[in-house]
Amino acid sequence: MRKKVDFLVVGTGIAGLSFALKVAEYGTVCIVTKREAEESATRYAQGGIAAVMYTPDTYEKHIRDTMIAGDDLSDPEIVKITITESTDRVKELIDWGVSFDKNMSGKYDLAKEGGHSEFRVLHHKDQTGAEIEGIMLQRVKEHKNIEIIENHFAVDLITQHHLGETFEKTAQDIECYGAYVLNKANHQIITILSKVTMVATGGSGNVYATTTNPPVATGDGIAMVKRAKGEIDKMEFIQFHPTSLYNPAEKPSFLITEALRGSGAILKTKQGKEFMQKYDQRLSLAPRDIVARAIDNELKISGDDYVCLDARHLTMDVILNHFPAIYAKCLSIGIDMTKMMIPVVPAAHYTCGGIKVDAFARSTIKNCFASGECASTGLHGANRLASNSLLESLVFSHRASLIAIKEHKRIDYNDSIPDWDAKGTVFNEEMILITQSIKELQGIMTNYVGIVRSNLRLKRAFDRLQILEQETEELYEKSVLTEKICELRNMIYVASLIIVMARNRKESRGLHHSIDYPKTYDAIRSHENDNEL
């Protein structure tokens, strides 16, 4: 089966949906998603979206907070672009119908999260992502030029090498002609030809054993672009959210939003002792990399399985009006957060690196854009500032649409692209080969490439992963394609990138903290306090 569209979008989070809505006025759009359309990381975003709305906040303050959180590795020009365009993009979201909480005066009830110097996070209780996803999906489904194909898996980008060409070209010479897409129901591969392709596949948290990411976050877009010889950047910076609910039997881990700490909840040991004063003057509202490392250190010292978040002093009015989902979730496992401390642990949460793109979300492959968590725009640097991610998606999908709308008119379809060749493949009847490899991969990454790393751990991870990669490629080549074998292959690609880039970074920086390159908390405090407002 073959299909032609003007714009192909892979992913149904805020990045993919906002891009689709903007380009749909100028051509046909096909959105591919490997599960149901509403299943994306956007849906699970609790805290909100950061933007400058009122005084005393300013663009300059938000820019400075972003640079500090990114350990000065963020691209200053990209940070400036993102922050100065924040207000317009959020207003556009509101115009689409997204409802953000307001206070008694009628103004938006802005929250303050770790690393922010002002109240600037718009939210819809503690279910901001679900509100955004629902409204945008409704808009997309109503648009006559947009088709959503659910339960289809994008296997590979189509480039020149599918024409049988063997050439020595740089990534800038490679062109994208669309994608090969797996129909999960019948295992058939569809050839979708497009003039412009937007990769918006989200993050890769599931390469770790404990993650707040939904099961769909397996790094598919990053792996596809890497196989197509596109440039990938800063994969060593994996953000661990400091506070996921400690409930080992549950996957994904339930996120306890940073906004709860912004409202006054305090991190404590199981014994009820505060500890953040030992690590940072901002206490429980320090940037996520510092808080996650502090918790990791406390757990290693105490031998405990978790620390606690104490919200017992918050009023019931604050809890029910701002954190109803968290309150209900805690109650469901026997924790009344008005009377008991919430057990929390860090969990893999956000991929700060990804597909390298420019200021208009163009990847190094022609006619291929990337936006959202799978992209490396330069905004986050070595650590993402809380609630900048939804904003980044809106800004760069908008900027991508400006270029895509202009350029698609001069791009022709490549009709010489062959259909997928599945000759000689057979159904893999031993699922244990895949499921066990996934467990091994997640164990390697969790134990050796986690919050704190070392050269020895990284080497061991690299050596172990090479064996898994070889075994998986052999299985992939002879198997009829399924979602699981494709996800495993992609996760191994992504894990490899994380390890290699971590080994190449000979310093401790932001989320990449190595015991071989010590960077003391005192040094961090000194640097960051110099920049506090």
Image (cartoon, rainbow, N blue to C red):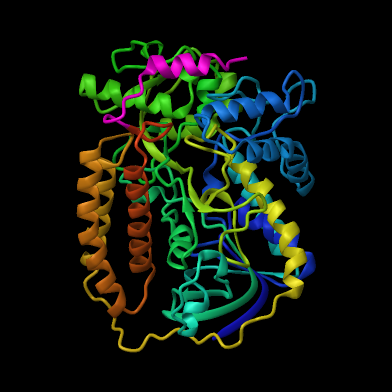
- Across and down, in percent, residue 373 comes to 53, 48
> Looking at the picture, does residue 434 appear above or below residue 98?
below
386 with respect to 132 (left or right)? left
506 with respect to 241 (left or right)? left
Of residue 414 and residue 338, the one placed in the foreground of this image is 414
> Looking at the picture, does residue 91 appear above or below residue 14?
above
| Quarter of the figure with the N terminus | bottom right
Q: Quadrant of residue 46?
A: top right
Specify start and end residues of the magenta stretch as a single range: 514-533
Residue at 38% across, 35% down: 512
- Across and down, in percent, residue 134 comes to 64, 51
Q: Quadrant of residue 380?
A: top right
- Across and down, in percent, residue 201 comes to 52, 57
> Looking at the picture, does residue 452 appear above or below residue 492?
above
325 with respect to 292 (left or right)? right
- Across and down, in percent, residue 425 comes to 31, 84
